[in-house]
Amino acid sequence: MAKSNPLEFLQQVRTEAGKVTWPTRRETAITTTMVFIMAILAAIFFLVADMIMNWGVGLLLGLSG
């Protein structure tokens, strides 16, 4: 890879940054909402899985009431 001076580098960076397709405000809001929904669903899943495993281990060890 050929070395370039700092000015050339900054020009190349600016050119490449101009090629980036930025998401719209609506796309960003939808994606953020989906992330929160998936995080909540994952938390509920792991809570239920933990409760089932806790119950199973307690039953196996004879600790349940």
Image (cartoon, helix red, strand yellow):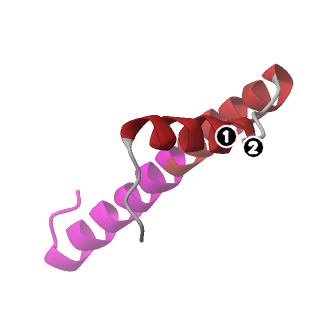
Q: Write down the residue under mark 1.
A: 15
Q: Write down the residue under mark 2.
A: 19
Does residue 61 show up magenta in the picture? yes
Q: Secondary structure at mark 2?
A: loop
- Cα distance, mark 2 to mark 1? 7 Å
Mark 1 burial class by Cα count in 10 Å: few <14, some 14-19, many 20+: few
Q: Residue at x 49, y 35 (%)?
A: 10
Q: As shown in the figure, which amino acid type bears the numbered disc 2?
A: Lys
Q: Which mark is residue 3?
A: none
Quadrant showing the C terminus: bottom left
- Residue 47: percent from left, percent from top: 42, 49
Q: Are marks 2 and 1 in contact (CB under 8 Å)?
A: yes
Does the magenta stretch mainly form a helix, a strand or a loop?
helix
- Asked if 5 appears above or below 46 in the picture, the reply is above
Extent of the magenta region: 43-65
- Asked if 38 appears above or below 27 in the picture, the reply is below
Q: As shown in the figure, which amino acid type bears the numbered disc 1?
A: Thr
Classify residue 16 by image quadrant: top right
Near-viewer residue (51 or 25): 25
Left or right side of 25 for 39: left
- Residue 58: percent from left, percent from top: 22, 66
Q: Residue at x 14, y 75 (%)?
A: 61
Q: Residue at x 16, y 72 (%)?
A: 62
Q: Residue at x 80, y 20 (%)?
A: 25
In this view, the residue farthest toward the bottom is 60
Q: Secondary structure at mark 1?
A: helix
Left or right side of 1 for 27: right
Left or right side of 40 for 30: right
